[in-house]
Image (cartoon, rainbow, N blue to C red):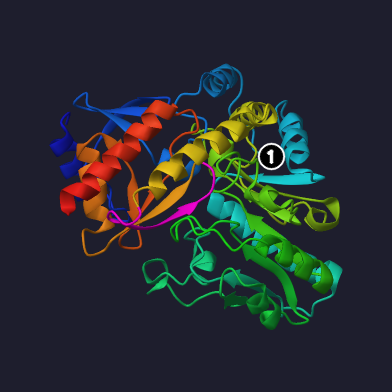
Amino acid sequence: MSTTTDLIEVSERRSAHNYHPLPVVIREAHGAWVTDVEGKRYLDCLAGYSSLNFGHGNPKIIEAAQEQLKNLTLTSRAFYHDQFATFCAGLGDLTGKDMILPMNTGAEAVETAIKVARKWGYEVKGVQPEQANIIVMEDNFHGRTTTIVSFSTDPDARDNFGPYTPGFRIVKYGTVEAIREAVDANTVAVLFEPIQGEAGVLVPPDGYLTQVRELCTAEGILMIADEIQSGLGRTGKTFACDHEGVVPDMYVLGKALGGGVVPVSAIAANEDVLGVIKPGQHGSTFGGNPLACAVGNAVIEILNTGEYQSRAAELGEVLHARLRELIGHGVVTVRGRGLWAGVDIDPSLATGRQVSKELMARGVLAKDTHGSTIRLAPPIVISEEDLLWAVDQLADTIASFR
């Protein structure tokens, strides 16, 4: 099994079809480029849905992982280890929060946020037992666990996985009035993405985050920002909420926190919120393990320089300026912020899947979502020359369908 055809055939036959990958088998990667098993190189314009913000094989992150691999990889949280305190303090300082609770995957972090919000509602706000509700957004994507898909509006994620977990109220994204109408005495939190990634990189109207913050403060409910895809440099700021100077009560983090090396996630909040969790009430064998913390510490050091945030902002301006030139030439709309864009292809020309496959043939890896939308989110280490080349390939691809 060494060729693309053989490897894909066995993968399709021996694994569940929970993904629909492009027909490429990657063998190695460096920076913004990957190489398949036949030796063909591709420019990665997806970056693991923001997991690879700092590039494939980032030297600082790899060095930290290799050093830790020689010493200690796992203790479970039954004991302390020497990387844990630095990780908690560092991520707490980065988010401006008193405490963090580390987990592994993004979905685990969202589940953790839900549990903490409910417990806070009962023990601090005084909500009656079993009555807590959390307001969520249409077209959200927070993961695919049973509880999370219970408030998904995506039929692929939700259908035939019931019975569903109660306690969520779904409202329209981008309007604070929809949230206001859904709030009642039992509301404990508003959970949202500052930019909806899976929905097509949807950026809410200016002032929306500020209005949500003001409403949550006035109503005494938690503002929970899922920055798993939008955070850690992707949008040109450390967090997407920073674009409006807004600080949520809780950050939900993942993906890039693991540097593309290991799954690392966490929630960050102040002690008056996270202090409700007591021993035995939540945990994970691998959550906050030594290897994860060592990698996370390297990521935090990288972010503390501000270099990647500035680079994403500068390259983002280049990306969006070039993409806007394609509007009216096979592109209907371009959205996004920083080095992150959703490009709506004219559906009369081609589907997003067709465009993605043609881009792959031209040496660019991107992925479609919701029919005719292409998401572009290359590693922040990408050069300006390579970034413009990628958009040129997109322009040529679209032209080939006209």
Answer yes or no: is residue 285 visible. no
Image coordinates for residue 172, horizontal then vertical, percent: 56, 75
Q: Residue at x 68, y 61 (%)?
A: 209
Task: Please tell me whether residue 215 is drawn above or below residue 359 in the rendered image.
Answer: below
Task: Please tell me whether residue 161 is drawn above or below residue 376 in the rendered image.
Answer: below
Find disc 1 in the rendering and name its residue.
77
Task: Please tell me whether residue 120 is drawn above or below residue 171 in the rendered image.
Answer: above
Q: Residue at x 22, y 64 (%)?
A: 348
Answer whether residue 331 is magenta in the image: yes
In terms of depth relative to the viewer, which is nearer, 72 or 375? 375
Is residue 174 shown left or right of residue 364? right
Q: Residue at x 64, y 64 (%)?
A: 191
Image coordinates for residue 386, horizontal then vertical, percent: 37, 29
Part of the protein shown in magenta? 327-338
Image coordinates for residue 353, horizontal then vertical, percent: 25, 54
Type of amino acid at the residue the image marks with label 1: Arg
Q: Quadrant of the C terminus?
A: bottom left
Q: Residue at x 76, y 78 (%)?
A: 129
Is residue 364 shown left or right of residue 229? left
Answer yes or no: is residue 1 visible. yes
Q: Quadrant of residue 95?
A: top right
Tag 1: Cα neighbours inside 10 Å, few (<14), some, or many (≥20)?
Answer: some
Is residue 249 shown left or right of residue 15? right
Q: Quadrant of the N terminus?
A: top left
